Image (tube, rainbow, N blue to C red):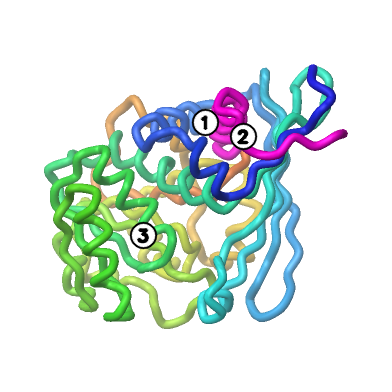
């Protein structure tokens, strides 16, 4: 065990990230891991501050893996030109408990979130089917990377701000994919899968139950900003973390929100249910530590970051 601690800034993390397809594989592993009994991921302790902002502590322990993420989400940062999500991830030695690597959590969170979505899409939605992403923020870009790597050919981004759509179209072109961009939610009518990445806590932005396919797969990243209890009630609801879902749903999504009846990680290798499917991936520390451990290993091999005394 080294007597030094490696610190990775966001640029170092970005350089050490696994590629999109590898990240999807890691996310699928994490989903299965969380659905089993060998991992400890308690519901996130949370504090709130400012205007609709919050911070979570996300500890995790599993065979060979130990760590914790501290993550803040400040929707108002978008207007300040700052990231809405920021934080730190600590990767520890699972035997001694000593910290091995501390890394900025922005790029890590963006990739692991998109990779979890990708694992669900790969399992439940053929690449020939149309996919829509609602939102134009950081997650739009991270998801486009994953969608391009998985080979989804019919992708539309639906955004409220016209000025944000053209840069996303150009970004997708750099990935070798052609996407549609629109401000109209009519584009969601034909989508087989809809990923929503609006700021958490918005009102008046929920999707209309009557405008969606009867076999749509919904993957909300924004709690109930897009998928409210009425729409959720028309779906089979699965979660990456059923225990955490039960703890946070009444507060984050409302008392009328239907419960999650299955773990996403237990269904990745099997058929999806008929009708609408809602995969409410809350973002749990199992996916963070699996990806972060690989980032730490890659960074050590590449000599990235700064070595600090303990």
> Can you give x and y, in whole percent of width and height, for residue 176 in the image?
18, 48
Question: Any mark on residue 209, and which?
Answer: none
Q: Nearer the viewer, residue 18 or 27?
A: 18
Residue at 62% across, 40% down: 285
Q: Secondary structure at mark 2?
A: helix
> Can you give x and y, in whole percent of width and height, for residue 7 in the image?
71, 40
Classify 10 Å Cα crowding around label 2: few (below 14), some (14-19), many (20 and above). Answer: many
Q: Earlier in the sequence, mark 2 or mark 1?
A: 1
In three-dimensional space, the C-alpha distance between marks 2 and 1, rounded to whole angstroms, equals 9 Å
Q: In the rendered view, does 156 fall on the left or right side of 89?
A: left
Q: Nearer the viewer, residue 107 or 74?
A: 107
Question: Any mark on residue 289, and which?
Answer: 2
Q: Secondary structure at mark 1?
A: helix
Q: Earlier in the sequence, mark 2 or mark 3?
A: 3
Which residue is under mark 1?
30
Q: Earlier in the sequence, mark 3 or mark 1?
A: 1
> Can you give x and y, in whole percent of width and height, for residue 262 in the image?
46, 39
> Can you give x and y, in whole percent of width and height, for residue 110 in the image?
48, 51
Tags 2 and 3 touching, CB below 8 Å:
no
Q: Nearer the viewer, residue 180 or 218?
A: 180
Q: Which residues are drawn in magenta?
A: 286-310
Tags 2 and 1 touching, CB below 8 Å:
yes
Classify 10 Å Cα crowding around label 1: few (below 14), some (14-19), many (20 and above). Answer: many
């Amino acid at each position: 065990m080294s007597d030094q601690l490696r610190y990775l800034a966001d640029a170092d993390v970005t350089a050490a990230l696994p590629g999109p397809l590898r990240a999807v594989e890691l996310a699928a592993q994490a989903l299965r891991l969380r659905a089993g009994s060998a991992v400890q991921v308690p519901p996130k302790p949370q504090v709130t501050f400012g205007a609709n902002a919050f911070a979570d502590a996300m500890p995790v322990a599993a065979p060979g893996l130990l760590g914790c993420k501290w993550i803040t989400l400040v929707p108002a940062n978008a207007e300040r030109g700052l990231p809405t999500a920021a934080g730190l991830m600590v990767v520890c030695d699972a035997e001694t408990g000593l910290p091995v690597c501390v890394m900025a959590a922005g790029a890590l969170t963006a990739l692991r979130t998109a990779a979890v979505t990708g694992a669900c899409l790969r399992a439940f939605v053929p690449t020939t089917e149309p996919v829509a992403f609602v939102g134009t923020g950081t997650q739009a870009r991270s998801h486009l990377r994953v969608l391009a790597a998985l080979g989804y050919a019919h992708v539309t981004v639906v955004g409220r701000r016209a000025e944000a759509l053209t840069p996303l179209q150009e970004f997708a072109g750099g990935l070798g994919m052609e996407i549609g961009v629109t401000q109209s939610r009519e584009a969601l009518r034909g989508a087989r899968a809809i990923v929503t990445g609006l700021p958490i806590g918005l009102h008046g932005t929920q999707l209309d139950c009557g405008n969606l396919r009867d076999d749509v797969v919904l993957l909300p990243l924004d709690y109930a900003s897009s998928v409210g209890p009425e729409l959720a009630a028309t779906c089979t609801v699965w979660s990456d973390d059923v225990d955490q879902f039960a703890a946070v749903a009444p507060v984050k999504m409302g008392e009328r929100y239907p419960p999650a009846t299955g773990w996403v990680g237990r269904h990745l290798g099997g058929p999806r249910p008929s009708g609408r499917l809602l995969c409410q991936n809350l973002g749990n520390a199992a996916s963070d530590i699996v990806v972060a451990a690989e980032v730490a290993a890659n960074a050590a091999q590449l000599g990235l970051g700064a070595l600090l005394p303990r």
